[in-house]
Every structure is written in C-alpha cells, then in structure tokens.
Image: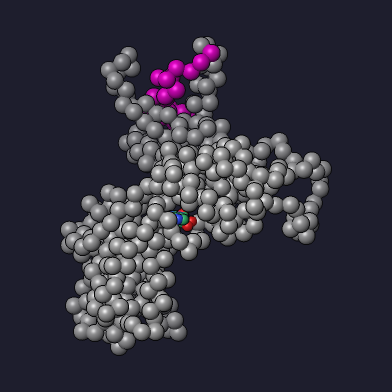
Amino acid sequence: MGATLLTLIFPNRNPRGAREDYMPSFSEILNRPTIFLDRNVLSPHYIPETLPFREKEIEWIMNGLSPALRNERPRNMFVYGKTGTGKTCSVKHVMGKLAQHKENSNAHSCYVNCRMYNSRYRVIQKITKELLPSVDSMGFGLALLYEKMMEEVRSSGRQLIVVLDEVDMVKDLDDLLYTLTRANDELQKGSITLIGISNKLSFKEQLDPRSRSSLCENETVFAPYTATQLQAIISQRAAMGFKPNSVDESAINLAAAICASESGDARYALKLLIKAGEIADYKGASRITDKEVDEARRSVDIDVAFEAISTLPDHQQLVLLSIANLALDKGKNTRLTTGKPEEEDSFLTSGEVYEEYCKNSRRHRKPRRSARWYREYLNELEMLGLITTIESGHGMRGRTRLIRIGYPPSDVKKIIEQNLSIIESA
Ligand SMILES: Nc1ncnc2c1ncn2[C@@H]1O[C@H](COP(=O)(O)OP(=O)(O)O)[C@@H](O)[C@H]1O
Ligand SMILES: [Mg+2]
C-alpha cells in the first residue's frame, strides 16, 4: 500500500534522482540520512508515560476501579468519546498502574480489542486464554469456555476487570453483556467488572435496556482535544521521536490546527507528523516545515480514504467510481464554460449518478442493483465520509438528493480502478 500511496502523491518522482533500473541494498537504505530518532514513540500504539489533559479522566477510572484493590467488586464503567481522544491509552495507563499492585491484591485486568474479538464466543475465549494460558481452548464450545473462566475466577478469588475496547463491534453484544454481568450472580468469591469503550456516541441507544443499565452504570466522555492541547501532545512526541531541531515550531502548530479544526483526534495528528517526517526524509530535507505538513495532510487523507474504499463491497465502489467520474467530467465542463465552479454545480444529482452507476455496472459485468439499494449505498458512503449529500430545495430540478465527493475525484478513481482490476483478475 505504501508504494501505491507514494505513486499517488509523487507520480513523477524518482528519489534522489536515481536511474529507473537502480536497485538499492538494505544497508544503503539503512544508512540514508533520516530525521527520525525513534519511530516507535510516534506510533499510535505507543503509550506515553504521562498523558497531559487526561488527568481527570484517568483519576475517574482509577477511582472507579479502586474497590478491586480492597477485594471488592467495582462497578461497571463506560468510556466514550470520538476517535483519537485518548480513551484506549488512558485505560491502558490505568491497567499498568493496577498491575503494579499484583503482588498484594486480587485485582487483575484483561484487555480485549473487540475489533478483533467481535463476538461473545471470541471475547470469552480471549479472556479464558489470558487467565489460563496453558489451556488449549481451540474447539471448546461456549459453555465449556465459560465454565473454565468461572472456575478460574472462583478459585483464585480474582477481582477481574475486563476492558472491552471498541465494544460496539461485538455482533451479539447484548448476549455478551448479559453473560458477563450475570456471571457475578454465580460467584461467591471473585467478580467480573466491565469497562466498555466506544467511539460511537449513539451506540448506547441500540442496546437492550438491561445491557445499557448494566454497562453504563458509570460513564464518562472524553472530549476532543483543542488546538492548544494537540500542540502540546505532538510537541512532546516530536521531541522524543525526531532528532533535535528537525521540526519547525510552526509545523507543529499547523498540524495541531489542522487536526483541531477537523476532529480533535490525536491519532490523526501523530499520523500527520510521521508522514511529514517521511516526506522530509524522502526529499533528503533536514527539517519538517509547514510545507511537509501540508503535503502530509493530503497523503494521510488519501490513506484514510484508501482504507475506507478498499474494504467497501463492489457495488458501493462502483457507485463511488461513478461519482468520481462525473465529478471529473463536471470539473472540466464548468472550467470550460464559466471559468469558475459554482457552489450548486459542484454537486451531482442522484439521478445522473444512478445512470452512470448502471453504465459502470455493465462495464464491470456486475448485475446492477435496484434504486432502493442504490440509496442505501449512498447512505453508507456518506456515513464513511466519502461523500456528502444534501436535499435540494424546490428549485428547477424539483426535490432531489445532491451529491458531492469528499476526496479528490482523480485519487478516488485511481484507488477504485486498481481495486476493481485486482478483484476482477482474481
Ligand atoms: N493526552 C495525550 N497525551 C499524549 N498522547 C496522547 C494523548 N491522548 C492520545 N494520545 C495519543 O494519541 C493516539 C490515539 O490515542 P487513543 O488512546 O488510541 O485514542 P482513542 O482510543 O480515543 O481512539 C495514541 O498514540 C496516544 O498515544
Ligand atoms: Mg481506541
């Protein structure tokens, strides 16, 4: 994927003027000058020693969990907030602190990433594996796994804290929550406490009222970071991750401002910083300036779009391709006729996109779906931020849905055409 993105961003570039057929060696690559000091520190998986601006949230979680250290069952907790607001790293930070009391308490925590363990069965299998690493649970049924887990908690008297990160990804979540909270009724010694974490603010409403009241006994919201906070967070990381004097202060400020205006997402801010560093290295530059941050932004946006687009089902890709094609055509035409695009004209009508989609389906030999499905696809593309739509007023077109693409259409077109040709040749 890296190579694909690089060719998208630098279509005609040849690093350091090398000949086309030139093949580098690993040792040469390793010896190339770089402004990175420690890339790990800049990775979104790195958990810094201190987490500025999350002191209150961390204390709230610690407070909630403290009964476990007195051998009592803590109440369940629910942490929510947008992506990149530090939920995962704050909870993991507290888990680290709890582990320091391993010797003199029964408190024990277990982290489950529900993006990977996305069903009741998988979550319970993961917990059992953590508690009993030597047991090979492959092929065990749910009831047996549950019994193993319960036996272990009962016999050790553990106050087990299960962190369910991205809990909304669990397919049978109501069943999982019911199983894990009811487990406490069967335990005279030891207990199970849940910490649910979610990026989806609205997901609580979809829960069964019983699950909701048990998981959300206690909840806290992580607010998006402001520009000043992001600035402090990324300067802290830049100071550890890059060589001295290799990041302009204004570049940090720009990265922070970009992220604050879009989402307040610290992960995005770090991605921008790493990408800006890679771009500086690629150019053989000795510092990151505003220019590299600007270029990084475009590349990170494409990265995000690339991930989202590549996992779309075929028909949604075809709808998006149709939108990209029409947007490109329209761009050419408006520039020809008026010289500058009108606001209304940057939108496509739902009807013309559907027509183009039918053509593209024929071209790619996929039986086209009905207009009802098509409207569903538009909703999903909009939810992923790949397009925006508005209802037109009572203008000359009557009432219709107007569509605008969220990323540069030429990039989107390249990504989809590549994907579709891979799928078709497979
Ligand atoms: N307050 C903070 N201080 C330093 N780094 C932070 C802070 N909040 C988030 N980060 C960094 O941002 C990235 C994303 O944080 P994460 O906890 O994964 O967010 P979330 O789980 O809310 O999506 C991680 O690399 C983390 O180290
Ligand atoms: Mg997270």
Q: Residue at x 36, y 77 (%)?
A: 108
Q: Vertically, is 126 above or below 78? A: below
346 falls in the magenta region: yes
Residue in front for this viewpoint, 220 or 10: 220
Q: Residue at x 38, y 64 (%)?
A: 91
Q: Determine which quarter of the picture holds residue 7.
A: top right
Q: Nearer the viewer, residue 285 or 156?
A: 285
Secondary structure character of the magenta stretch overall: helix
Residue 258: image location, x then y, percent? 48, 39
Where is residue 88? Give x, y as percent: 40, 60
Q: Quadrant of residue 67?
A: bottom left
Q: Quadrant of ligand 1?
A: bottom left
The answer to whether 423 is drawn above or below residue 112 in the figure is above
Q: Name the one closer to the observer, 12 or 234.
A: 234
Query: Which residues fall within the magenta stretch?
Result: 339-362
Q: Position of residue 397 (x, y in %)?
A: 33, 17
Residue 74 locus on image (x, y percent)? 25, 72
